Image: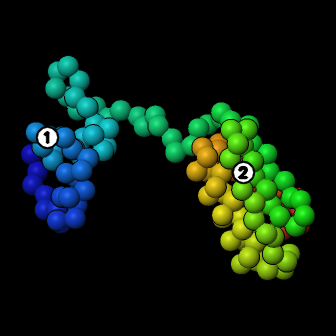
Amino acid sequence: MKTIRISEDVWEAMSKIGKFGETPDDVLRKVFNIKNDERGHTMRTPQTESVRPGHATTRMSSFIARNRLHVEFATGEIDSWELPSMGDKAGIRKTRDLAVAFATKQGASLGQVNAVKKTLTDAGYHLVK
């Protein structure tokens, strides 16, 4: 058994994750997906949840029309952003980031997020890392 010191803000965060009667060890086991087998030995379970689904569950389309980037989902969510000039790298990045954030919020898959980015690059809006 080890003893650790934690700050008040970490303690508060742990108290929000834990349930009444759980020890700090119980909360950390939950956070790190650590469980005990039937003999009491610690086993780490693999992380199965992902931030985004591995495949698309809702149809999405992204396109450029009338100098705007449009992203639409079959469920009805839609948004669009005014496109900056092709030389305005900061503006392109901002538009791309807003569109990616919108798609991610709608549960877009990695492929769909990449499709949003590709819509911009196919139209000549390139960014260099």
Q: Is residue 71 above or below residue 129?
A: above
Horizontal and vertical percent position of residue 108 = 64, 44
Q: Is residue 22 visible?
A: yes
Q: Is residue 111 visible?
A: no
Name the mark on residue 78: 2
Residue that appears at 42% across and 37% down: 47
Please state which of the two labelled residues, at mark 1 or mark 2, is closer to the viewer: 2
**Image quadrant in which you'd find residue 70:** bottom right
Horizontal and vertical percent position of residue 123 = 89, 62
Q: Amino acid at mark 1?
A: Phe
* 26 sits to left or right of 101: left
Q: Nearer the viewer, residue 121 or 44?
A: 121
Give the SS element for disc 2: strand
**Image quadrant in which you'd find residue 127:** bottom right
Residue that appears at 26% across and 32% down: 35
* 83 sits to left or right of 40: right
Mark 2 residue crowding within 10 angstroms, few (<14) / some (14–19) / many (20+): some
Image quadrant holding the C terminus, namely: bottom right
Q: Which residue is mark 1?
A: 20
Horizontal and vertical percent position of residue 101 = 61, 58
- Which residue extends farthest front? 76
Q: Nearer the viewer, residue 70 or 35?
A: 70
